[in-house]
Image (cartoon, grey):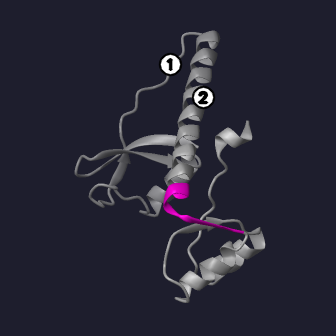
Amino acid sequence: MIAYNLSCARGHEFEGWFQSGAAYDTQEAQHALACPICGDGQIQKAIMAPSVKGSVTKAKGRSEVATSDAHDKRQRFVSGMRKFIEENADYVGPRFPEEARKIHYGEVEERHIYGESTIAEAKELIEEGIDIAPVPSDPDDLN
């Protein structure tokens, strides 16, 4: 992944993440980029400060700290998201596919649910047009 600072013709600056530099170039050539603030399609790379390392040791140390910080932030985000889901949705366990269909087809009152399904069941739900999303595992449970 590569992050670019981008700007639109109206001067809004924002960050864009791309699979590679070539992926950015392809999207730019196809005019597939738009400003998230105003929707302007005239996007260009903004000036970015280079990442200059004083030595290999310093670079390694900074990299490890940045990686650790990013990991901690991801863990807090995932934990918070799981907590929100658990507090605001009904746990239906392995009955998830059945309950999701009942809600989708109006057989029961609409509500937020979470539970388990196999990959095959999840694919079937998606093919039926039922909106579902995987809930990441609690990072605290993985340690």
Q: Which residue is mark 2?
A: 67
87 magenta-colored = yes
Of circles 2 and 1, the one toward us is 2
Please give the range of residues in magenta.
85-93
Which secondary structure lies at badge 1?
Answer: loop
Q: Amino acid at mark 2?
A: Thr
Residue 31, labelled with which disc?
A: none
| Nearest to N terminus: mark 2 or mark 1 | 1
Which secondary structure lies at badge 2?
Answer: helix
| Quadrant location of the C terminus in the rendered image | top right
Query: Which residue: 59% across, 39% down?
Result: 75
Q: In the rendering, at what x and y percent does residue 9 appear?
A: 26, 52
| Quadrant location of the N terminus in the rendered image | top right
42 magenta-colored = no
Quick check: 85 above or below 96? above
Say which quarter of the image contains residue 66: top right
Please rate how many residues cluster around mark 1, counting C-alpha atoms within 10 Å: few if below 14, some from 14 to 19, many from 20.
few
Quick check: 126 above or below 134? below
Q: CA distance from mark 2 to mark 1?
A: 17 Å
Q: Amino acid at mark 1?
A: Val
**Nearest the eye: 122 or 48:** 122
**Nearest the eye: 4 or 21:** 4
Side of 102 relative to 49 (left or right): right
Q: In the rendering, at what x and y percent does residue 129 appear?
A: 58, 82
Query: Which residue: 59% across, 70% down?
Result: 132
Residue 52, labelled with which disc?
A: 1
Please rate how many residues cluster around mark 2, counting C-alpha atoms within 10 Å: few if below 14, some from 14 to 19, many from 20.
few
Q: In the rendering, at what x and y percent does residue 31 appear?
A: 41, 62
Query: Which residue: 55% across, 28% down?
Result: 69
**Nearest the eye: 70 or 4:** 70
Query: Which residue: 33% across, 55% down?
Result: 35
